[in-house]
Image (cartoon, rainbow, N blue to C red):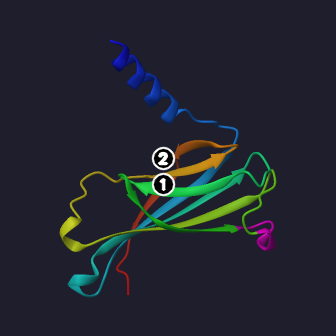
Amino acid sequence: MQYHMLHILLLYLLLQQNPELIRILEATRQEWTGGRKETGKGVDYEIRLVVQKGSARLKFVSITVDQLGCDFKIRNVNRPEKLNRYHKGDTLVINALLKKPQEQWQEKVKSYPVIGCTFKKSVYYFPVRQGMEIEKKPYK
């Protein structure tokens, strides 16, 4: 019985979110297909958000979709020269790429990214669900 309670507590702590860290403004998703079979398919995501707390302790550590890691870049619209130091009110744009080989692509439901970030030695996860616009376009 204690074992199950421990699992429930750990799951709660993993899913615990701090809504005051970031506020997601909008997100877009664009599927693409490579020109050759071996290039596979993928999805480009663009997530626009506002930092709610300024701190050098806020760090974006992962973008995942269906537990698959994405390559990502972060651009600070307000202070491009600050790199990884964010101030309260800064607008950030995260560009993430999920690439899957052709044989792994069997997606029936559109999946959404989850942003993982750390703040003061704690890890928080923010699912991106609102405002996802679906666009399909061949990638060249």
Percent of width and height locating residue 40: 27, 77
User: Relative to residue 128, is residue 100 depicted above or below?
Assistant: below
Q: Quadrant of the N terminus?
A: top left
Instruction: Please tell me in which quadrant of the rendered image residue 87 appears.
Output: bottom right
Check disc 2 and report the residue beneath it: 129
Disc 1: which residue? 132
Answer above or below: position of 12 versus 48. above
In percent of the image, x 77 and y 46: which residue is there?
A: 53
Image spot of residue 89 (x, y percent): 79, 52
The single residue placed furthest to the top in the displayed view is 1
Q: Is residue 35 magenta?
A: no
Range covered by the magenta-colored residues: 76-82
Asked if labels 1 and 2 touch by Cβ distance under 8 angstroms, the answer is yes
Q: Quadrant of residue 113?
A: bottom left
Queried whether the magenta region covers residue 78, the answer comes back as: yes
Q: How far across and down, in percent of the image, does residue 20 sit?
A: 70, 38
Secondary structure found at label 2: loop
Query: Where 124 falls versus 39 (above or below)?
Result: above
On residue 35, which mark appears? none
Residue 69 is situated, as x and y percent measured from the top left of the image, at 42, 60
Q: Is residue 115 left or right of residue 57?
A: left
In this picture, residue 48 sits left or right of residue 34? right
Q: Residues within 10 Å of mark 1 (few under 14, many from 20)?
A: some
Reply above or below: 41 against 92: below
